[in-house]
Image (cartoon, rainbow, N blue to C red):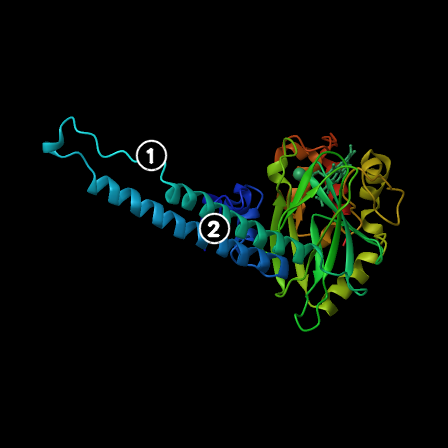
Amino acid sequence: MKRWLPILLGLVGTPVIAFGNDWGMGASNAKIPSPAVFSPAATPAHEIRTLAYFVITVCAVIFVIVASLIIYSIIRFRERPDDKGREPAQIYGSNPIEFAWTTVPVLIVFVLILTTARTIYSVQAAPRPPDSISVHVIGHQWWWEFRYPELGVVTANELHVPLSDPAHPLPTFLDLESADVAHSFWVPRLAGKTDVIPNRRNTMWIDPHQPGTYLGQCAEYCGTEHALMLLRVIVEPRPDFDRWIAAQKQASIADASVDHGRQIFETTACVNCHVVRGTAAEGRFGPDLTHLMARETIGAGAAMNTPDNLKVWVHNPSTIKPGALMPAMNLSEKDLNDLVAYLVTLR
Ligand code: HEC
Ligand SMILES: [Cu+2]
């Protein structure tokens, strides 16, 4: 499907996903299938598509009937030269007609309510198998934090989950909470939207049937950078997922050649907002940077994760993401280069 088509249909409204930006997102996103609700890749999204087709069919039939009747009436009962001043016959209080156009719509609406309720129930009531992966999703202005409580991993913006074989389902259950305002977690090809609300824990699950990368975004207006609160779900076969987990569990490795950069990192405010496990950086306000380079993007899908973009970002995040809640750090050119050289070792 052409990438702009979903935008026109209002299915995914983020221009950066469709058209890219100056920070390399266009080429990367173009390789990923369009995040359209009509190409589901997990059970909840399948159920939603089935329901959507049913509702669209019912509405289309109603539309065709009503539109044909209107067109027929316009032609059949149009004003003719010989009926000047004459009104058509007026019919009042026909019980059968009144009865028909009350009950039929009520019945149609009732059928739509029941099928919708059935779909919602069958998705929400799905049991949580004991071996399912569980991820704690925390919405922040304007990025996503992903914690795997049972696996001891914390990452941001790019959620890794194992492939689920329909014969042996391995779903991932997400518990969603917000650190600030209301957000909404939406990966159209995997599941419906789930609101992410402060002081409330919502739950959803996904069981992706195809490996690959899935684009998603925050779907509840949450402030200046709402449109750049994107996310990716990376679905990989279990062995690859396990390898990713094992790598993420490691603390950062101290690389002596970038000592100066590490010192700058550890002695500036970075440590108040970021975690790099294995160092003194224990801030929780921003994304965990322990394995920064394992991510393809920075700034929640705002820029590709390249050394050049990292430099622009650390120099002044607002160049890439105006209003981002990370201050410009005003480092000298040399310090900035050394710091980025250090960041690039966080694999
Ligand atoms: C006041 C808190 C704060 C300080 C200080 C801070 N950051 Fe950040 N940082 C953030 C926030 C918040 C984000 C997420 C911004 C977004 O995506 O909207 C972020 C994002 C980043 C990212 C992108 C991470 C990703 O995966 O998207 C990098 C890299 C980064 N910061 C490095 C640094 C470095 C290096 C320093 C010190 C020179 C620093 N930060 C100082 C809050 C801070
Ligand atoms: Cu949001």
Relative image position of residue 284 (x, y in whole percent): 82, 40
Residue on which the image places disc 1: 92
Look at the numbered disc 1 and say if its residue's Cβ is closer than 8 Å to ligand 2.
Answer: no
Is there a contact, CB below 8 Å, between mark 2 and mark 1? no
Residue on which the image places disc 2: 3
Relative image position of residue 121 (x, y in whole percent): 67, 55
Relative image position of residue 168 (x, y in whole percent): 71, 72
Q: Amino acid at mark 2?
A: Arg
Q: Nearer the viewer, residue 230 or 343?
A: 230
Q: Which of the two labelled residues, at mark 2 and mark 1, occupies the earlier sequence position?
A: 2
In three-dimensional space, the C-alpha distance between marks 2 and 1, rounded to whole angstroms, equals: 52 Å
Q: Amino acid at mark 1?
A: Tyr
Say whether residue 120 is visible.
Answer: yes
User: How many labels were placed on the picture?
Assistant: 2
Relative image position of residue 5 (x, y in whole percent): 45, 48
Q: Quadrant of residue 244?
A: bottom right
Q: Nearer the viewer, residue 217 or 95?
A: 95
Q: Which mark is residue 210?
A: none
